[in-house]
Amino acid sequence: MTDMGRVYGQSAMDFAVQAVALALDDSGLDKNDIDGLLISGGLCSYLNMSDAVSMHLQKALGMQDLKLVNEMNAYGATAASMLQYAALTCASGQTDAVVCVFADAPLQENPTAGYGTAINVGTGIESLNGPSGILNAATQFAMAARQHMEEYGTTSEHLAEIAVATRAWATMNPFAQKRDPITVTDHQESRMIADPLHLLDCCVVSNGGIAVIVTSLERARDLKQPPVRILGWGQGHPGDRDDRMIHTGARMSGLQALQMAGAELDDIDIRQIYDCFTYTTLVTLEDYGYCAKGEGGEAFSNGRLGPGGDLPTNTGGGQLSGYYMWGMTPISEAIIQTRGQAGERQVPKHDLTLVSGNGGALQYHASLVLGADI
Amino acid sequence: MPRDEKRPTPIRTDGTAGFFDAAKHGEFMLQHCGNCDQFSFTGYRYCPNCYAKTEWRHSDGIATVKSFAVVTESSHDGFKKLLPYAVATAVLGEGPTLSLRYDGEAGNIAIGQNVKVAFQDNGPDEATPVWVAL
């Protein structure tokens, strides 16, 4: 992974190339060992910004005669889906080593337009969001959080507990953008963005790139880093199902991933949850089955998700405090923890990690179970 | 009006021409399927239930609020003037769900309340649907 955050002077495509170079160096593989490339872009791709990540990445990487290339999109569920697809092609023998890349560079040193106005307008019925003032994800997730509050009695203070626990992890991550500890009071006093969501319910925005190389276990064992095994995966896409805001695709995709890995929820050591907002962490853990439906507010309070808690979650600061690389944020931290390379934030037991990727306004979901080679 | 202060307006497609034609004179329409008798609001020609061709049909636009958000910060000059404004997802009597801005006091909206579609005249541009209190 490249430097993260307010890193200026290069495009998303530049970050993508840099991320691949770093991943090759990290693994000990040569560029010519790579025979598959899966590509995913972030905000730049949807805002049609210059040099957004695209199929041109193959050319930028100087890779020819690959056996697999695809630009994939399930929004925040893309990264986990890329790893699934890469694993399938490696398992079938179609490919030997596939590099999965996400890169984005929406932050500008001298911004000409805010992310708040940066909407994908669409046409026809899809074009009604912009005129309706639904200009960002915060507005949609605010409606989701309010629905949960109305149905189950969840409070803003419950969401604050998640922000505080996630920030506590970020204080120990040199890659994290927000590293000053916060309190529930800080959360409550942070300005309102879209009621009921405060500023500290929202993720950061980042420039950067992350590349993950998928290959066979035999091959991985001969490389420089400890292998991280892809033990299970699943997807669950509610689409526009009416109650998807409080009953998400995490349930369906999580059950599949655990079943494939032959694991129970109790076997999972660490959770890396897609956290575009605090609410997303709450509802995802709830739908994974970490508490009875609707009880996530109380269940994930009192530091349970934070350092020293019994449910270590988003141990790098997630997207709330760490870096916003969409579905690659939880995957990258899962890899760092599974390898035992997380420094002072290392979770002592790190054999099995459950990873989520959540796309759109809760329409799309993909899960992974990643494990150490033990 | 300076360009940045102009709020975005809807973009007509061939499949939504019937909707936006009716919107111009303040009438709200939904898609209706003559084959399975279901209402939908995709803007695409075929019924999402049975894939038969749909037709635009009048609706009273009355819906029940399922959830709402009160937007308190915007970097869009056209919406800054409206802050704080509410956005609500509401379920129409015919079935489809729709998310629109609530044109009224943000503090007056509540889950379970009934609202109704109205249109804002945008001159030569397409009319914008909003929720109004019933």
Image (spheres, coloured by chain):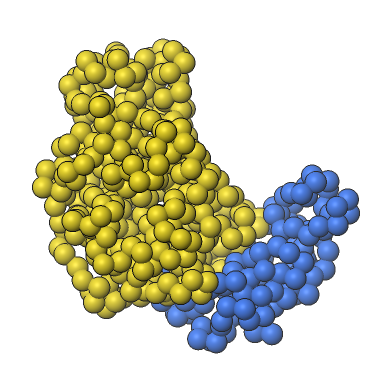
Chain colours: A yellow, B blue
Q: Residue at (21%, 29%) from the top-left corner? A: A22
Instruction: Out of B36 and A373, give the one closest to the viewer.
Output: A373
Instruction: Out of A9 and A235, give the one closest to the viewer.
Output: A235
Q: Residue furthest right?
A: B34
User: In the figure, residue A217 lies in which quadrant?
Assistant: top left
Q: Give the side of residue A82 with respect to residue A29, left or right.
A: right
Residue A24 visible in this rendered orientation of the protein: yes
On the image, the x and y values in percent for residue B43 come to: 71, 54
Q: Residue furthest left?
A: A344
Q: Is residue A121 above or below residue A215?
A: below
Residue B18 visible in this rendered orientation of the protein: no
Please count the marks in the image. Answer: 0
User: In the figure, residue A125 lies in which quadrant?
Assistant: bottom right
Instruction: Out of A10 and A369, give the one closest to the viewer.
Output: A369
Q: Is residue A192 above or below residue B95?
A: below
User: In the figure, residue A69 lies in which quadrant?
Assistant: top left
On the image, the x and y values in percent for residue B77 come to: 43, 72
Q: Give the side of residue A28 with respect to residue A156, left or right.
A: left
Q: Residue at (34%, 18%) from the top-left corner? A: A216
On the image, the x and y values in percent for residue A341 come to: 15, 37
Q: Residue at (17%, 36%) from the top-left corner? A: A340
On the image, the x and y values in percent for residue A295 come to: 43, 66
| The C terminus of chain B, quarter of image | bottom right
Q: Residue at (83%, 46%) from the top-left corner? A: B52
